[in-house]
Amino acid sequence: MNAPEKIRLTEFSHGGGCGCKIAPAVLTELLATTPVRGLPEALMVGTETSDDAAVYKLNESQALVATTDFFTPIVDDPYDFGRIAATNAISDIYAMGAKPIFALAIVGMPLEKLPVSVIRRILAGGESVCHDVGIPVAGGHSIDVLEPIYGLVALGLVHPDKVMRNSSARDGDLLILGKPLGVGILSAALKKGALSAEGYARMIEWTTKLNTPGATLSELPGVHAITDVTGFGLAGHLLEMLRGSKLAAEIRVSDLPLIDEAVRWAKQGTKTGASERNWKGYGEDVLLAKDAPDWQRVLLTDPQTSGGLLVACAPDAEQAVLQDFARHGFAEARTIGRLAAGAPRLSVA
């Protein structure tokens, strides 16, 4: 590896991955005063329920799904950073039940600080993911900025009747999570130079694993709603589902899929700043057991970069959903709780 490749990308960023998202409370305040005007009838999904992507009906058999996602480095290796950012962006297409068709690159780089060879590796990492999906990077935009930023505009197609919203869950649905939690905690340990080689391998494994089950889950009877768990953590994105669906939920910590090393770090007090901002933004709607240790709260609010799909399905569809996850290589998918009538609050047992 030549000298430029040894640059630590995380040293350039104040927060990495989806952990650098604007805090949920601030984002709510910003959007509350943003006018929404002249919405076309063909716009099936917009900003109303904080869903994963916009959906526009093209005709009776096709709807266009459009999303964008970009962030600062979560890892030091440029190729891995590109892969993670691209995987994360494309995840929103799968979360809507769609199949990707092409992408545009979003590139912001500190040109005086980063060699061209490093930037080229970032772009190559993102392109490699798109190649695996079978889509081109058909264009994009680049600027010179103080921190490295990379991501994609991703577009996909889905049948209008198969669109998966985060607001269409039903009373009695089970909740199934496709990936283990803890990526944000691992990234915090990495930034301190304390993450083990095994922990880094797990982090790369999950952040570069495409959420391909989304496109097939939308075809299953009994699957009512899907979202993906990213910067607001499991609790935050589940609360978005609850508010959109006007339901309450109960989950069990003992049933959550967790990354073992992340749990160890959380018990030692390692966490991201975004986890604390998340809790301040929505913690009043999360009911924890009185004797719950703090590490459980940290894992619930931990920002996930390229996190798992969260599926709400009828009880009789549970096994079909778990089998579909398993067919795509998501053996750690777990049923974590249930939805019920009530105010949109999350109870954690």
Image: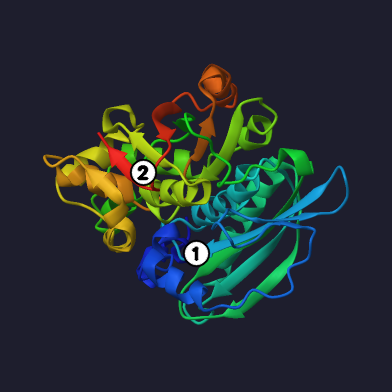
Q: Position of residue 139 (x, y in %)?
A: 75, 65
How crowded is the residue under tag 2: few (<14 C-alpha within 10 Å), some, or many (20+)?
Answer: some
Instruction: Give the left or right position of residue 271, taking residue 257 as reference.
Output: left
**Residue 71 image label:** 1
Given residues 212 and 149, the one toward you in this image is: 212
What's the residue at 20%, 39% (across, down)? 264
Given residues 216 and 210, the one toward you in this image is: 216
Q: Position of residue 338 (x, y in %)?
A: 41, 31
Q: Is residue 88 above or below residue 15?
A: above
Kind of element beneath mark 1: strand
Q: Is residue 176 above or below residue 39?
A: above
Q: Which residue is mark 2?
A: 200
Amino acid type assigned to the residue bearing label 1 in the image: Phe
Residue 185 seen in this snapshot: no
Amino acid type assigned to the residue bearing label 2 in the image: Tyr
What's the residue at 40%, 72% (across, down)? 26
Q: Position of residue 77 (x, y in %)?
A: 45, 55
Instruction: Give the left or right position of residue 135, taking residue 176 as reference.
Output: right
Residue farthest to the front, as pictured? 342
Kind of element beneath mark 2: helix
What's the residue at 43%, 74% (across, down)? 29
Given residues 254 and 6, the one toward you in this image is: 254
